[in-house]
Image (cartoon, rainbow, N blue to C red):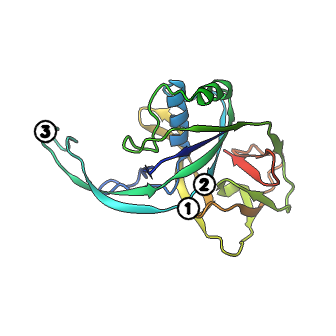
Amino acid sequence: MLVFDIKAKLGHFRRPDTTGTHATYPFITRTVLQGLMASILGLECLTGENWAGIELLHPVQTCSQEMSMLGKGWLGEAASTFNRPTSIELVVNPGYRIYYTGNHIEKLHDMLREGHSHYHTYMGSAYCLTFPRLVQYAQAKEINPESGRELTCKTVIPSHAIENLVPIDGSQYGRVGGMHYEYVGDRRFRGTINVIYETNGRPIVFEPRNSINQQKPYRFYNIDTPEVVCLW
């Protein structure tokens, strides 16, 4: 499994259901993450089988401000003169540890190890530059947890993988609904997924759903700690 960090001062992962204002998801989405990895490799999009997990390194914080969309033509207005102040929500000081395995793992590891990237990498928008840093290239063991057994997970988790959430004192939980699952090109997407996260990046304790003999759009792995990571 390939492990790397991405950090920045700002991030913006626009929710597609917002038009007049630009609201953001609270953390990087699956499609943005796959686009970032494709940019490193010089690809239009990732191909083949790809599994990734997202660990929050910093608490989720957002702020809103108005930005000038100078040069963005709208309804026939001249692109060189049109100016539309737009309210934009930004993620402040985003930081994520990414866990990846898939068809591109060897090439992606080589690029990260050398600090190379074919294209610029962003935290969602072009004004939110980020520079990925390799953490480790580790052996990971996939686990198939038994129903009723509690797990402690370092990453965000698809809600359909959770049978029972075990609340921990001091933790705050959030849910992201309707996140795009797969980009198919030409600004089109396929499928959605709902995700549970802890707002301060603390581990999540839960009982996994019994999914034996069922096709799962998620996987649990153990690397070198008692905690697991969830890839989806």
Q: In which quadrant is the C terminus drawn?
A: top right
Q: Nearer the viewer, mark 1 or mark 3?
A: 1
Is 167 on the left-hand or right-hand side of 15?
right
Residue bearing the label numbered 3: 78
Task: Decide which of 121, 18 is in the foreground and name it.
Answer: 121
Q: Is residue 2 visible?
A: no
Task: Decide which of 183, 228 is in the foreground and name it.
Answer: 228
Question: Considering only vertical position in the picture, is 149 above or below 41?
Answer: below
User: Residue at 61% across / 70% down in the picture?
Assistant: 172
Question: Considering only vertical position in the picture, is 92 above or below 107?
Answer: below
Mark with earlier residue (2, 3): 2
Residue bearing the label numbered 1: 59
- SS class, disc 3: loop
In the drawing, what numbered circle is on residue 56? 2
Q: Position of residue 183 (x, y in %)?
A: 51, 37
Task: Decide which of 115, 29 is in the foreground and name it.
Answer: 115
Q: CA distance from mark 2 to mark 3?
A: 42 Å
Mark with earlier residue (1, 3): 1
User: Residue at 72% across / 72% down in the picture?
Assistant: 168
- SS class, disc 1: loop
Q: Position of residue 154 (x, y in %)?
A: 70, 55
Q: CA distance from mark 1 to mark 2?
A: 7 Å
Question: Considering only vertical position in the picture, is 123 above or below 171?
Answer: above
Task: Decide which of 54, 59 is in the foreground and name it.
Answer: 59
Mark 2 residue type? Leu
Is 219 on the left-hand or right-hand side of 22?
right
Q: Position of residue 175 (x, y in %)?
A: 58, 62
Q: CA distance from mark 1 to mark 3?
A: 41 Å
Contact between labelled residues 3 and 2, with CB atoms less than 8 Å apart: no
Contact between labelled residues 2 and 1, with CB atoms less than 8 Å apart: yes
- SS class, disc 2: strand
